[in-house]
């Protein structure tokens, strides 16, 4: 049995714990974290990817995925305009990841974080739950029948109502899709019980589930208020009022969705901190000196019914910086986080608090000397929200680089396109889930 140690691993910087708390990582104190749990952390002094996957044993689902034959063009490349028809084709491609036996276990109905890696955190579960809601809303699946939205949601809720919990009714950090049990190896590697950011992502999806189907409100509330004990995390969320990190924003809103009296002020203060930070200019665009990457901004735009105008303005400025960088350098960019293709999970920062821009770091917060990845999920998000020629050209470049542009999407490609294309081999739920949300957002806005 894993001994519970409720901590938050300092994913983004090696001195993150000491900046906020003098205690060590192996205490029961909670240290805030602002990013989802990556899998497969490797030694920060290790050499780049040498062709072998690091980070533990990859156990596939019982069914071997049968992928469609490749076709020469993706939905955007094949269309003159990126209309709702093209976006439905994009959504259909992304949804393939969540087919039973591919990214979802055919017996338990639980997701894996990436193809061939049938383990998941609460972040991954939140992504899958949101994907189910999005897929039904745009007509990819029905509500009824086997593997319809009702059936899939029932499997998720049943898991949450019955899953193995750690001491104090806290969720474990990692679970195994095939057994629905706690994944011991992953929890030991993570050195803790649960991640606050992962919890926040799940809370966002559960809040959206109540809006999607009000008949599930009581079950969701019982899960959040009765079965789980999230109160030990509350001090972490309160501490975020002193930070200027865009990752904190959707996480804080997730907690505020269920405890508005305690946390409704926290997301507002985070944006205020970012907006009032000193500015740095990059390629002629001024951005605040804060921790800024794209994924949390688009999660907030796609998954919250109401958006703060400051968030929308910040997102637009970050997009304009990407386009200006391309105009100057000729290299596409879609900065986010995810697999790098070199056996390292990376974070790409458009800006950091020290004023540096366009920085790639590993999970220890150390600069990582590789070309940035053009993340597929952010390229599609740019196209969904801003509908620009730059975003379309970037998506077309990605589609042409992919071996199967009409199947579920790889995490990304190297930013050296078109000079030296390198495709990340990983296909994951974060990528395909966000692309599905981007498609739903565009279809709803422009039916």
Image (spheres, helix red, strand yellow):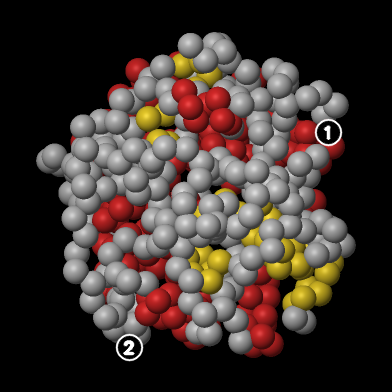
State the separation of the CA atoms marked 2 and 1: 53 Å
How far across and down, in percent of the image, does residue 386 sit?
52, 75
Q: In terms of image quadrants, where is residue 279?
A: bottom right
- Report crowding for label 2: few under 14, some 14 to 19, many 20 or more residues within 10 A (C-alpha): few
Q: Taking 315 as reference, is 179 left or right?
A: left
How far across and down, in percent of the image, does residue 370 sit?
64, 65
Q: Is residue 270 visible?
A: no
The residue drawn where x is 21% and y is 32% is 107
Looking at the rendered structure, the number of numbered marks drawn on it comes to 2
The residue drawn where x is 44% and y is 41% is 124
Q: In terms of image quadrants, where is residue 260?
A: top right
The residue drawn where x is 74% and y is 52% is 366
Q: Which residue is mark 2?
A: 80
Q: Taking 308 as reference, is 175 left or right?
A: left
How far across and down, in percent of the image, does residue 125 sit?
41, 38
Looking at the image, the residue that sits furthest to the left is 145
Q: Quadrant of the C terminus?
A: bottom left
Q: In terms of image quadrants, where is residue 68?
A: bottom left
Q: Which residue is mark 1?
A: 18
Helix, strand or loop at mark 2: loop
Taking depth in this image into account, of 6 and 367 the one nearest to the observer is 367
Taking depth in this image into account, of 116 and 207 the one nearest to the observer is 116
The residue drawn where x is 23% and y is 72% is 70
């Amino acid at each position: 049995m894993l001994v519970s140690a409720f901590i938050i691993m300092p994913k983004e910087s090696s001195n993150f714990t000491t900046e906020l708390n003098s205690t060590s990582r192996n205490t029961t104190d909670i240290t805030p974290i602002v990013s989802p749990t990556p899998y497969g952390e490797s030694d920060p002094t290790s050499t780049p990817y040498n062709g072998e996957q690091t980070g533990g044993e990859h156990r596939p689902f019982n069914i071997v995925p049968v992928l469609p034959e490749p076709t020469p063009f993706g939905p955007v490349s094949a269309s003159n305009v990126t209309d709702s028809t093209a976006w439905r084709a994009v959504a259909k491609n992304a949804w393939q990841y969540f087919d039973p036996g591919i990214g979802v276990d055919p017996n338990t109905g639980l997701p894996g974080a990436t193809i061939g890696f049938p383990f998941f955190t609460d972040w991954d579960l939140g992504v899958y739950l949101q994907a189910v809601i999005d897929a039904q809303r745009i007509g990819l699946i029905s509500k009824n029948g086997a593997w319809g939205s009702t059936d899939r949601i029932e499997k998720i809720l049943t898991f949450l109502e019955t899953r193995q919990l750690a001491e104090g009714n806290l969720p474990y950090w990692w679970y195994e899709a095939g057994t629905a049990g706690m994944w011991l190896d992953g929890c030991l590697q993570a050195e803790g019980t649960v991640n606050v950011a992962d919890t926040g992502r799940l809370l966002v999806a559960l809040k959206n589930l109540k809006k999607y189907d009000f008949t599930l409100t009581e079950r969701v509330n019982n899960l959040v208020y009765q079965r789980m004990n999230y109160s030990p995390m509350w001090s972490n969320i309160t501490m975020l009022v002193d930070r200027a990190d865009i990752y904190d924003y959707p996480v804080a809103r997730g907690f505020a969705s269920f405890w508005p009296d305690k946390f409704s002020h926290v997301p507002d203060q985070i944006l205020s901190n970012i907006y009032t930070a000193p500015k740095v200019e990059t390629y002629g665009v001024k951005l605040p000196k804060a921790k800024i990457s794209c994924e949390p901004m688009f999660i907030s735009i796609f998954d919250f019914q109401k958006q703060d105008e400051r968030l929308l303005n910040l997102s637009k400025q970050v997009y304009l910086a990407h386009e200006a960088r391309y105009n100057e350098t000729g290299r596409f960019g879609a900065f986010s986080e995810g697999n790098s293709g070199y056996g390292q999970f990376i974070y790409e920062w458009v800006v950091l608090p020290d004023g540096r821009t366009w920085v790639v770091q590993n999970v220890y917060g150390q600069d990582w000397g590789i070309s940035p990845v053009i993340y597929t999920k952010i390229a599609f998000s740019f196209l969904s929200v801003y509908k620009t020629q730059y975003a379309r050209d970037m998506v077309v470049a990605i589609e042409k680089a992919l071996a199967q542009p009409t199947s579920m999407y790889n995490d990304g490609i190297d930013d050296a396109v078109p000079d030296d294309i390198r495709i990340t081999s990983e296909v994951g739920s974060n990528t395909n889930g966000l692309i599905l949300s981007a498609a739903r957002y565009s279809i709803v806005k422009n039916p």
